[in-house]
Image (spheres, rainbow, N blue to C red):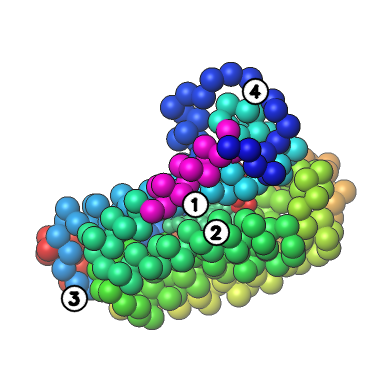
């Protein structure tokens, strides 16, 4: 199938299994799926462990499917950015239509199977998350506004809510704060990276904040969003999934992230050029540990909170 988003023919060889796996963006999605799993494991209720495992697998499948849909639509952008030009579609090993087909098929399977294994609310939320990332973010916001990351970040924030709903069939303050944590974290996570991948988005004419408002403004925005992130991250510690362990971890992690954001905001481009964006690169790496560690802390806290009847503790 031909697609207007497909890059010029640059066939360089046959697609291998690894190329189809790459379409699912496994590295990014591993953290996404982990947050969903934590949402599921912390939700009060009884889900059989096999059902819980199946639900996590179907959420992972849905996340991967949304990655394939993004790769289909973004093939033209990916082809001109150094970071992404070797991806399966722009490098010509996988046809754009194949990515679309795989993305649609896996999305359908993931949503229906999550529905059958858990409930309609979780399946509906998964479908909405896929739609949000593939259509609202990739097809619309990404190319339209520097707010792309801020609004589009909601897509990546839904997974713990999906996981929670898979157990309870509903929403609560806790998953909404988990949503808030990822939502507020996404802009500093991405903008730190955008600062040191400075030419990519210019070349691809994607209106990222670095391109439309410059890097000095992006530095200030990183600090503002990090400052707004801190109360959400700490606030989660005062809900039923929180406690002393989580709060101790959150204080350390947020202090470190805030210091990183302040360091970024105080630097000039000349300073960053001189040391090859070492601070920005460190803060980006820290952002990944930051989010991962918050969700690990929630798990450890749950094991220490005997009043939380989680499915993995009572085993369905
Ligand atoms: C609109 C939202 C987001 C944007 C634009 C964004 C953008 C990026 C980009 C461009 C990279 C560079 C590396 C790569 O190509 O793999 C990256 C890395 C990464 N992101 Fe994000 N991200 C977003 C949300 C998220 C979310 C919600 C998570 C997880 C909960 C996440 C987890 C990761 C991880 C784990 C990596 C490292 C991947 C690796 O080591 O290759 N991101 N992100
Ligand atoms: C359960 C479910 C459906 C989860 C989906 C979660 C989700 C929306 C994750 C998005 C994270 C991500 C890969 C952003 C990259 O942005 P980009 O596509 O602009 O980055 P790129 O330049 O690397 O392609």
Secondary structure type for disc 4: loop
197 sits to left or right of 25:
right
From the image, tell me which residue sits under label 3. 307
Q: Where residue 89 sits in the image (x, y, percent)?
A: 60, 34
Real-space Cα separation, disc 2 to disc 4, in angstroms:
28 Å
Residue at x-position 54% and y-position 67% = 154
Residue farthest to the top, as pictured: 13
| Nearest-to-viewer mark from 3 and 1 | 1
Q: Is residue 157 visible?
A: yes
From the image, tell me which residue sits under label 4. 11
251 sits to left or right of 43:
right
Q: Where residue 29 sits in the image (x, y, percent)?
A: 46, 48
Whether the residues at callouts 1 and 2 have beta carbons within 8 Å, the answer is: yes
Front residue (pair 110, 237): 110
From the image, tell me which residue sits under label 2. 133
Question: So how many labels did they put on this image?
Answer: 4
Q: Is residue 96 above or below residue 184?
A: above
Q: Quadrant of the N terminus?
A: top right
| Nearest-to-viewer mark from 1 and 4 | 4
Q: Is residue 313 visible?
A: no
Residue at disc 1, CB closer than 8 Å to ligand 2: yes
From the image, tell me which residue sits under label 1. 66
């Amino acid at each position: 199938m031909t697609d207007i988003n497909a890059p010029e023919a640059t066939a360089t060889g046959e697609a291998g299994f690894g190329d189809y796996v790459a379409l699912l963006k496994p590295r990014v999605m591993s953290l996404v799926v982990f947050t969903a799993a934590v949402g599921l494991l912390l939700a009060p209720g009884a889900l059989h462990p096999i059902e819980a495992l199946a639900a996590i697998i179907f959420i992972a499948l849905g996340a991967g499917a949304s990655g394939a849909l993004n790769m289909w639509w973004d093939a033209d952008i990916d082809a001109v950015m150094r970071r992404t030009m070797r991806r399966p579609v722009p490098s010509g090993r996988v046809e754009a239509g194949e990515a679309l087909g795989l993305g649609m098929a896996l999305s359908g399977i993931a949503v229906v199977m999550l529905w059958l294994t858990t409930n309609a609310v979780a399946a509906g939320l998964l479908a909405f998350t896929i739609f949000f990332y593939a259509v609202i973010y990739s097809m619309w916001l990404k190319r339209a506004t520097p707010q792309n990351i801020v609004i589009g970040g909601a897509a990546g924030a839904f997974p713990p809510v999906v996981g929670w709903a898979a157990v309870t069939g509903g929403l609560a303050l806790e998953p909404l704060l988990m949503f808030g944590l990822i939502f507020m974290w996404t802009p500093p996570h991405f903008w730190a990276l955008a600062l040191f991948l400075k030419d990519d988005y210019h070349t691809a004419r994607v209106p990222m904040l670095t391109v439309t408002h410059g890097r000095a403004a992006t530095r200030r925005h990183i600090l503002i969003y990090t400052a707004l992130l801190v109360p959400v991250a700490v606030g989660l510690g005062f809900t039923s999934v929180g406690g002393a362990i989580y709060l101790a971890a959150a204080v350390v992690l947020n202090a470190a992230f805030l210091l990183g954001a302040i360091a970024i905001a105080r630097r000039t481009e000349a300073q960053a050029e001189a040391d090859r964006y070492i601070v920005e690169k460190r803060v980006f790496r820290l952002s990944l540990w930051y989010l991962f560690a918050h969700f690990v802390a929630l798990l450890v806290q749950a094991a220490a909170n005997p009043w939380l009847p989680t499915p993995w503790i009572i085993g369905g």
